[in-house]
Amino acid sequence: MRQEKRTPKAKDGKGTSVAERHTVLTGEELTALDAHWRAANYLAVGQIYLMDNALLTEPLRPEHIKPRLLGHWGTSPGLNLVHTHLNRLIRNRDQSMLCVWGPGHGGPAVLANSWLEGTYTETYPDVTRDAAGMNRLFRQFSFPGGVPSHVAPETPGSIHEGGELGYSLAHAYGAALDNPDLLVACVIGDGEAETGPLAGSWHANKFLDPVHDGAVLPILHLNGYKIANPTVLARIPDDELDALLRGYGHEPLYVAGSDPSEVHRALAAALDRAADRITAIQRNARDSRDGSARDGAAYERAAWPMIVLRTPKGWTGPADVDGLPVEGTWRSHQVPLPAVRENPAHLAQLEAWLRSYRPDELFDRDGRPSDQVLTCVPAGTRRLGGTPHANGGLLVRDLPVPPLDDFAVQVDKPGVALHEPTRVLGGLLARIMADTADRRDFRVVGPDETASNRLEALFEATGKAWQAGILPTDEHLARDGRVMEVLSEHLCQGWLEGYLLTGRHGLFSCYEAFVHIVDSMVNQHIKWLKTSRELAWRRPVASLNYLLTSHVWRQDHNGFSHQDPGFVDHVLNKSPDVVRVYLPPDANTLLSVADHVLRSRDYVNVVVAGKQPGFDWLTMDEARAHCARGAGLWKWAGTEDGTREPDAVLACAGDVPTLEIIAAAGLLRRHLPELAIRVVNVVDMTRLMPREEHPHGMTDAEYDDLFTTDKPVIFAYHGYPWLIHRLAYRRTGDANLHVRGYKEMGTTTTPFDMVVRNDLDRYRLVMDVIDRVPGLGVRAADVRQVMEDTRTRHHSWIREHGVDLPEVSDWSWEG
Amino acid sequence: MRQEKRTPKAKDGKGTSVAERHTVLTGEELTALDAHWRAANYLAVGQIYLMDNALLTEPLRPEHIKPRLLGHWGTSPGLNLVHTHLNRLIRNRDQSMLCVWGPGHGGPAVLANSWLEGTYTETYPDVTRDAAGMNRLFRQFSFPGGVPSHVAPETPGSIHEGGELGYSLAHAYGAALDNPDLLVACVIGDGEAETGPLAGSWHANKFLDPVHDGAVLPILHLNGYKIANPTVLARIPDDELDALLRGYGHEPLYVAGSDPSEVHRALAAALDRAADRITAIQRNARDSRDGSARDGAAYERAAWPMIVLRTPKGWTGPADVDGLPVEGTWRSHQVPLPAVRENPAHLAQLEAWLRSYRPDELFDRDGRPSDQVLTCVPAGTRRLGGTPHANGGLLVRDLPVPPLDDFAVQVDKPGVALHEPTRVLGGLLARIMADTADRRDFRVVGPDETASNRLEALFEATGKAWQAGILPTDEHLARDGRVMEVLSEHLCQGWLEGYLLTGRHGLFSCYEAFVHIVDSMVNQHIKWLKTSRELAWRRPVASLNYLLTSHVWRQDHNGFSHQDPGFVDHVLNKSPDVVRVYLPPDANTLLSVADHVLRSRDYVNVVVAGKQPGFDWLTMDEARAHCARGAGLWKWAGTEDGTREPDAVLACAGDVPTLEIIAAAGLLRRHLPELAIRVVNVVDMTRLMPREEHPHGMTDAEYDDLFTTDKPVIFAYHGYPWLIHRLAYRRTGDANLHVRGYKEMGTTTTPFDMVVRNDLDRYRLVMDVIDRVPGLGVRAADVRQVMEDTRTRHHSWIREHGVDLPEVSDWSWEG
């Protein structure tokens, strides 16, 4: 079907010969492409405006028009054009392709194309590919009980919500990783291109391995306007734009115009050229890389092609409305004709607009798309709405998580030996990395902190992905590495989201304070998962797992800017179906939690754990049992004798609070042995919530049994103390709950001073018990004074010596 | 002092003649610059390692070494080099300059320079510029009770915390705006350059007006490494980097090397050339712009110069340690010699390193810097540590906030007339914008949403800043505009922070859901303000004011991705000294809140307000009184007769919850007139907190008086309901509090369906009252059934009609 003039073999910039093809569309092909485009445009306009008379079988009347006009027209003709031409490319080359629609607020366009290719009807059988189905397609759009106006989980073929902007290119790269046969097209709006995350994502091509990964084809759509403004990239000089894109490491191919035939011809040619170039780059890399997978600088990074598509915003829509220009301006962003129901002139203009696409040529009398319209549409799973890569749960395989006992630390007695929990975890992760060397479906991402977070065992199993220059002094860099390090939390998050949603597994290791950088991204991912879980056709994908370490209590040296435990609060505002939060207090509990989250599906798991040497409390078996319960009594740490209720409960969540609580219990055992103290540790934060609010929540009976209904509970919590009150506010014993945690008393100081400043230290906790248990005598007051004095001594000691009190740094459990 | 060879006048790219000067340093000048650099390097190393023997008057012994070695050496020699040469530039040209230190974890460098130039001693008189002071400077660094290891509020001359990376360039542009004589140098580390926000900030030059704004001089420091990895920009080919920077709109000037003399010569020349070029660009623009301030495309945007500085990481530090290369690799990132106290070889290596700077040449016997070292140091407020621009409170002037009555809406009766609150606010902002036309110290920033958020009255007073191409069809674009719109929340936030910290005023208008994009930035700004407030020498600056609109309840059309009210929770975790949250329920209360926040200092004020037409409840006088109280009883809306305690309290915060509460009160009045219902509205969320936790918090007596101690309180809240429990958990009536709010039940639907889905609607609120007031009879049960039936009717109605029930959309108050 495609005619090609083959030019003599040309040399590309890297010295490899590629066949340059000058695509010339036949008249038929052009007509068919244009028919498909017109059909998609018709369907997009219909979705925005119509609730009846979809085929315009009768003159348009106000009652056919939706009472609220919602949706985004401006970007839709461009998206329709791209989709039409990607269809052609896929069909001509039998190409496996996924498309990420950055301007996803152009939902009508993507829905229109899905309906045309048939995947919409296969996904939602009630929206048939005929007149009745077209009516339903139109009516449901942005209508109560219907579908969102943006590309969303409900949209077949999508892994990318079109609401919040900035993440399309990162998602595209995430999808392409370890999918060597996949071509991921990514439409980037010139509005989105202004965001920081998108601007930073261009450099993702320095991390994409042409041998083991697929390709990303960015299509920068310069329609010139955002909501109410021109865009930066559309208004800088051509040579500046060209330099920028080449500086990003791309070879830009330009397509511009407003004459449909010319643009069709140019876009088809550009896409063919881009696809040829991608094939050549991949072939070159795959042929030239020798047997060793870590051959370093064996080949040069090529300039990947990209397309710059410059077409009018709202193209083919009303040129002017009420005397003001609309097509080709920001005024076409949403609904170009706003008053169609009330204003007969607008109604007439809408009808003329719809009829300008000549629907009678595009759809038969039953509303089915004509053969001509469907000429270029691919079949089966090659359709963009039908690719299994966009429904990763179809592809995901269980991760081979090895037996934990291979990595567990031996614990003969609690609170004596020290381990760095994340380093222990590193061994487990390294094994998984090694065991997936062939499958290549597991990655660890992080902002340059894998070693700092003590996971460097990973580098025994794989390298750090790197396609830029490599020097002899470098360590662990590898073209095919599956640890991804870049100093951009946004890129890490975007890569991992794209990787997971296409059916793979991963972990994001991050400094606790700086994971707030992706607060908004995780919001959107949680929303995506919540909605996906309600769609039977979307199969469960691997959970998004955060390992937050370098946490608030051990950022004493980096200071106030690095001290923020609030991410847990942030995610716990979101859907309880999706969110899980774990605070394992030692190495073995971290292993057990990791085992659980790496096997789980459709969650966002937040794991906060220490990287500094910390005491081992539980054997592996105890850790497993404790993590399975999520919260439980640590009998050995307390002084209950079982004959009566405890006098006070010391509860803790997080590694440092656990240490302080156990040390406080030890002080009480020594100084006030007659007190019956219960120690409770919480690993799974959602256990504290009422059962009605979270599936992991304890029943009131369970809660009361653990925490009592009337005894003082001193709760030492890793983060902001208010969270515990929030989680527990409906419990009977709520009024007896006294929480210590981080209250923004941060600075550059010693580790123990961090807990002292925030009143979370063992001495303060002992004072809290003494202050709250009724009926204690003079001796308790003396003990209290000793605690107070120790705190005072601490303050002067650290200022003199710069390190913590010996009795704190030398402490170990003597129970 | 400077020798120049003047070449014949050359033409620059834009056709303007500039004098090209080939700087040639004299031997003396070179020697002096190098001495200053060595002195700064010496002082940086000393801070990291020494707690005594600062001048090395005796051989180095373990007890001179700090017990914990903390700090970042790697970037420090580069920062010292830049500071040394900026000193020269300032002094030679009497240039007003501010420097933003992106690699601010190199705190030792900036502190060293401040001490050398004398500003440190002027700010902290106990750290004298002599041997004793040097000892103190060293000891206090990253030491308990001392100073942070990063550039921080404590650092003279800084407006930029060096902890979290990504914001340096945005801060620099914010500082330069409306400071036409100021040159803002901005050192950008190649690590930071990988972040999204930084990558997006390069385009800020399309918003900088060469006439009314100062200049930004980016200095991209390619030392090649992050914590443990090479950096992207240091490892791409030179031509790719050059294209990238030109694509960003810059003219890059390259300085590279590891021979100090050569680098000194090249850097001095490049800085001179950059300064000349900046002067020429400004002169050209300022001369050619005609009288009309909005002359559009009257001049072409010039390529601003920038410097690319490629020097080794950890330059002049140990070349190798324990047989591994350190200088010029990532291993020099923090503390190159880690075991100095324990390992005599390391100790010897440290001593040799320190002595390599020849401290006896640099400091006299009393530890004072030699005259040679100080040759290039400027004087007074020209010193980088002494510029008032870095202590904006010295410069800030009160904003001329006009009388609110000029903008107030007339309210004859509550709940009848409708206004769009943000549109009303727009009038006030426009007046302020007009009244600061000469002062130019007020800006409004936002991601392309000023008009969408209905603040377009602003465009009567100013335009939107825009230095890229302008077309005849464009509206409101202006070279000198003071509304800043770019589709990057990061850039908006960064600009505003830089603008405020240099002594000006502003407002950030943002979609509520997407302000989470800057969660982490606001964390850092709050931390900055908290610390600044504890430093007497830092004078209070204007507050950072957020106007969050397009909020969760009116994003029914944009769907789930646009529905997130969690920013309030996020900021309320932070320091109560700094954070204020306001939810004005109508137009006049919004005016009153705006008046307050625009006059305030050193806060982060979050104002959540509606842009859709909403009922006016209060006259301007009532609004003023209500906002002054922050929370109060709305007697007219309830049914208390004053003879007894109410049967229930209906409380509300936020515009939509207020509407639903008042409608619920109306339903109760009609259906159950015998009930005594109290209506309470909360504007200032922190009023709910205990007085001990927040300065705005109510005392228990005040709280109990308003909410009662034992009556059911049905609280309809704008955001996540748990927040109210968290804020009120210590109150006596806490157990009777029942909160409704957003619980992530979002989708694309109608406005009223949003409240129904989240159980915040008037019918549910009436049911809540009936369920909680004891002793109600059969009639109440009937009323409850009517409410239930209406909710059922609502569900089918919206699915059929696509709009809300007429009784909801036509509602007005009938009290």
Image (cartoon, coloured by chain):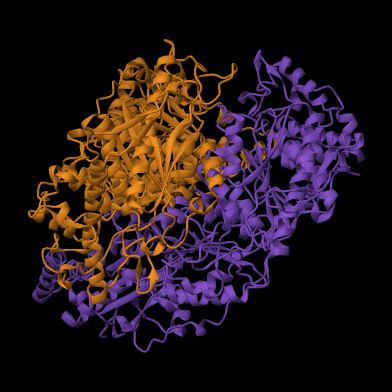
Chain colours: A purple, B orange
> Residue most toward the top?
B291
Relative to B748, residue A701 above or below: below
Q: Is residue B431 left or right of residue B60?
A: right
Q: Position of residue A784 (x, y in %)?
A: 13, 71
Q: Quadrant of the C terminus of chain B?
A: top left
Q: Quadrant of residue A412?
A: bottom left
| Observer-nearest of B636 and A160 | A160
Give the residue at x 28% y 24%: B399
How many numbered callouts?
A: 0
- Would residue B789 be seen by someone viewing this image from the given angle? no
Q: Is residue A218 left or right of residue A33?
A: left
| Observer-nearest of B279 and A772 | B279
Relative to A604, residue B486 above or below: above
Give the residue at x 43% y 42%: B716
Q: Quadrant of residue B672?
A: top left
Give the residue at x 67% y 60%: A213
Q: Quadrant of the N terminus of chain B?
A: top left
| Observer-nearest of B126 and B329 | B329
Q: Position of residue A71 (x, y in %)?
A: 65, 33
Q: Position of residue B353 (x, y in %)?
A: 25, 64
Q: Quadrant of residue A127?
A: top right
| Observer-nearest of B676 and B409 | B409
